[in-house]
Image (spheres, rainbow, N blue to C red):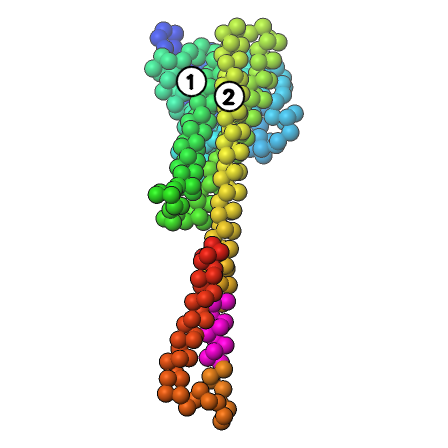
Amino acid sequence: MLTVYDKPANGTGLNGREGAQNIGTATVWIDLINPSIEEDDAVEAALGISIPTRAEMREIESSSRLYVENGATYMTAFVISDIGAHFPQTSTVTFILAKHRLVTVRYAEPKAFSLFLSRVNKGMSSCSAGEEVLIGLVETLISDTADLIERVQDQVEKLTAQLFQVKGGQVTRDRRLDVVLRATGKEGDKVASAQEGSLSLERLLNFFRDTVRHNGGDAQIMERSGAALTDIASLNDHMGFLTDRTSFLLQATLGMINIEQNQVIKLFSVMAVMLMPPTLVASIYGMNFRHMPELDWAWGYPAALVLMVVSAAIPFVYFRRKGWL
């Protein structure tokens, strides 16, 4: 789908229309979502640029993501498609600046794009040129990343309380360590995705600033891009802290799983030791020898039972005093 956004002569906001035939002098943004070959060709013919393919957008080397070609600046970044999803997915978005127009090529629909349009139409963000649209989109993407990190932090706090919760001096047993382990891994994966997107946006902004500076661009754009870089730096610090915390939580969960397994094995070992003396007594009096004096005792059977109970109780008391039970 190809959507063309024009800056109205009077008022605020952007006028969006579909179709390459609507590209005109007032166009500041051309948004390509899952573009067809015909739509790619139409934009290329109208602006004199080359639209990268989906395979080219996925290349990870910097020279393939940030470059200038035929007077147009190409910048590709990883972005988080849906921060509200159970497992947020990342996708690549290419930003192309050509003659103060912005072309975005994407194969997903990040929520940041619709949020940016909503803010623009409310007059909360200016967009008289492609550079302003780009920095506005990047600011919204950074804000989305911050929201994701806040959600992860809240979830990590809950998992930490669930893992280490103590009531009345005793660790609570109403927790499933395997559930905590999986949930912690999920939150760690979200942080990793956010870090990947943040690093990609940081590289994009640095390249964008160099391009604007080289072209003698607007000082306000430079100021906004500098503020965006500062926000990314603070996010990176926070994500580094969350990465360490989720790693600690994973290690602590695995440690508790090992402790519980050891407790079970210890219990079985103690029970086996406790049952050894009664088993020995029962084995002795289970032998079928003719000359066994105890077989003729009237109280022989009760005496054997008492002996087995006492022989089991002695190890039990010993283990309790040692603190092994």
Tell me: 134 left or right of 84. right
Q: Residue at x 42, y 28 (%)?
A: 150
Q: Which residue matches tag 2?
A: 234
Asked if residue 68 is among those painted magenta in the image, a careful observer would answer: no
Q: Residue at x 47, y 84 (%)?
A: 286
Residue 73 position in % (x across, y down): 59, 18
Asked if residue 282 is among those painted magenta in the image, a careful observer would answer: yes
Residue 275 position in % (x across, y down): 47, 70
Seen from the viewer's position, the closer of residues 15 and 106 is 106
Which stretch is magenta?
Answer: 273-283
Instruction: Please tell me whether residue 33 is drawn above or below residue 301 in the rendered image.
Output: above
Q: Residues within 10 Å of mark 1 (few under 14, many from 20)?
A: many
Q: Secondary structure at mark 1?
A: strand
Cα–Cα gap, marks 2 and 1: 33 Å
Instruction: Please tell me whether residue 77 is drawn above or below residue 119 in the rendered image.
Output: below
Instruction: Please tell me whether residue 34 is drawn above or below residue 311 in the rendered image.
Output: above
Instruction: Please tell me whether residue 307 is drawn above or below residue 184 in the rendered image.
Output: below
Q: Residue at x 40, y 45 (%)?
A: 171
Q: Residue at x 51, y 55 (%)?
A: 262
**Which quarter shows the C terminus?**
bottom left
Q: Amino acid at mark 2?
A: Ser
Q: Amino acid at mark 1?
A: Tyr
Q: Secondary structure at mark 2?
A: helix
Residue at the bottom extreme, as displayed: 290
* Disc sitting over residue 244 in the figure: none
Q: Which residue matches tag 1?
A: 5
Residue 9 position in % (x across, y down): 39, 7
Question: Would you say the magenta stretch is mainly helix, strand or loop?
Answer: helix
Asked whether the viewer can see residue 123, the reply is yes
Seen from the viewer's position, the closer of residues 74 and 325 is 325
Nearer the observer: mark 2 or 1; the answer is 2
Q: Residues within 10 Å of mark 2 (few under 14, many from 20)?
A: few
